[in-house]
Image (tube, grey):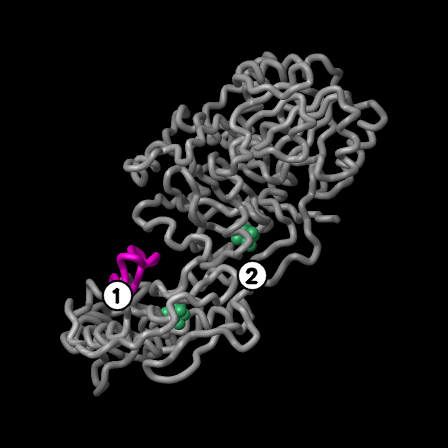
Amino acid sequence: MITFVIDGKSLEVQEGRTIIEIAREHGIDIPHFCWHPKLSVSGNCRMCLVEVDRSPKLVIACATQATEGMVVHTNTERVLSARKSVMEFLLINHPLDCPICDEAGECKLQDYAYAHGIGYSRFDEDKVHKPKRVELGPHVLLDTERCIMCSRCVRFCDEIAHKPQLTFTDRSDRVELTTFPGEQLDNPYSMNVIDICPVGALTSREFRFRARVWEMSATETICPGCARGCNMYTWVRNNEILRQTPRYNPAVNEHWMCDHGRLTTFPHVNAETRIKSPFIRKEGELVEVAWDEAIARAASEFRVYRKNEIGVIASAHATNEDLYLLHKFSRDVLGTKHLAVVPHVVPGDEDQLLIRPDKAPNAHGLLSLGIVDAYDRTALDALVKRIHEGQIRALYVVEEDVCAIPEVAAAMTKLDFLALHATTENETTPQADLIFAASTFAERNGSYTNFQGRVQRIRPSVATLDLDRSLDGFAMSRLDRAGTAFDRWGRGQKRDARPTWKIIAGIASVMGFKYKYQTAEDVFHELSSAVPGFRGLDYRKIGTTGTMLNAPKEMTVRT
Ligand code: SF4
Ligand code: SF4
């Protein structure tokens, strides 16, 4: 350890750390564009200049290591004047089109222009003009005039995605970012460059010009796209998700997420094919009904069959709370042991950074809650065989499109009764006798357990009628904050969907069992005292970045 002084604070620090790293750890903000904590140091923007005693020139804080007795000043007149000069230099050719720029409101150049700029321009000559809409890849567009050549995007592709696809051509004020000849920016993590670009040079094809950042609310939640469970924000306006961006969690995903998770996990939330209320088959037709009628029908049907005539299919897309209650309901109310799951493993679709082969968020939860012994087809195949043999006559399927699997679809025609929880129309919904409108990951509270055995919270960002009525008022307060000027329901979609745990509790209560849970947290409270792996956990301990199970199980994944 060495002694190091910054802005009058004397610190004991490790030798070899840079000034910017130490300052950051001690709450001192040194402005910067090109430096990023997870990328190599490039030192090209010169925004982080600081003064060091006995050094004749200012030094860049990102590339200067602390030494014994070093005394650093981050706010002297020389430093402030240098910052002003750097800002003036960067803005010479910048188009200054903040009013139409997607980055406005979350742009470092804009923020620093307010904090460190001179407030006017001395530049009377013509600005250099460059291409305004360059397609770097399928999801990322470049406005070359806005680029300040910080090279963050280039280093991200080289060092994190391990796909060198971006580079610079030309020199001086003619420098342009581009892809290598014959290359596109199409690696599975390409959209992270949009997040780390400190200006509005890189924009998302899917999100650009759809909303200003201050019109949206951001909710801390978890990506349901695979078993990694990347921490992310969902950004909502008018009760519609417009984008998803990564949320820093050093134990799970650092600063990153994959393009698949970012883009494909939410469009179904506002899809036209959403199941917006419960349906019952009457005289061969599926008819929309009220919740009480649907729940009463499920209860009366389940009473008709003997215990070993009922099968249950659970889902790795459901939350721990949903699965705990489904397990309890199957055991204590239905009395069946015939539980199965649908594995969602895509062999080989994985990498060393984030992407996992299991494309569901909560297989570890299924195993930890003891619903099945292995995350594979064994129990499902046995269940299908029993249906074919006429031993199972009624099936309760939670959040799985089982008819998308041909062998299972063939068995469904043999059933007397099929009850289904579904978020959207799928191949199974036309076969069902009873459909419960299930809320999506973006409309419910709860938790997933990722492949590491880390329990993480999901939170609602989009309202359903049920959330509106619920005690926590969570969605209401969020929407009020961001959406008062808009139609809260956006696109006229009033979805009367409910979380799976609540539907199960409703059926159990009608069948004479006391399931008096008001919220997902009530279910988790019971779960954490009943299941050893979860013992001692609560929503406060899980917090925003999750916590590990006690003695997480090794996951058995067979395909
Ligand atoms: S596009 Fe953005 S991240 Fe890439 S070099 Fe330019 S300013 Fe930096
Ligand atoms: S790696 Fe998995 S959890 Fe992370 S963003 Fe991609 S799909 Fe989502």
Tell me which amino acid carries mark 2: Pro
Of residues 283 and 168, which is closer to you in this image?
283
- Whereabouts is ligand 1, in terms of quadrant? bottom left
Horizontally, residue 195 falls left or right of residue 258, namely: left
Q: Which residue is mark 2?
A: 188
- Is residue 104 rendered magenta in the image? yes
Q: Secondary structure at mark 2?
A: loop
Q: Which residue is labeled 1 in the image? A: 96
Residue type at numbered disc 1: Leu
Please report the bounds of the magenta region as a residue range: 96-111
**Residue 35 visible in the current orientation:** no
Specify few, some or many for label 2: CA neighbours under 10 Å numbering under 14, 14-19, or 20 or more: some
**Residue 190: x and y, percent?**
50, 63
Question: Residue 373 location in percent, x, y?
Answer: 72, 39
Q: Is residue 80 left or right of residue 495?
A: left
> Would residue 458 be counted in the magenta stretch?
no
Q: Is residue 558 above or below residue 154?
A: above
Q: Is residue 381 visible?
A: yes
Q: Which residue is found at the position 55% from the left and 38% from the top?
A: 534
Location of residue 423 with respect to 329 vertically, above or below: below
| Farthest residue, direction right | 389
Q: CA distance from mark 1 to mark 2?
A: 31 Å
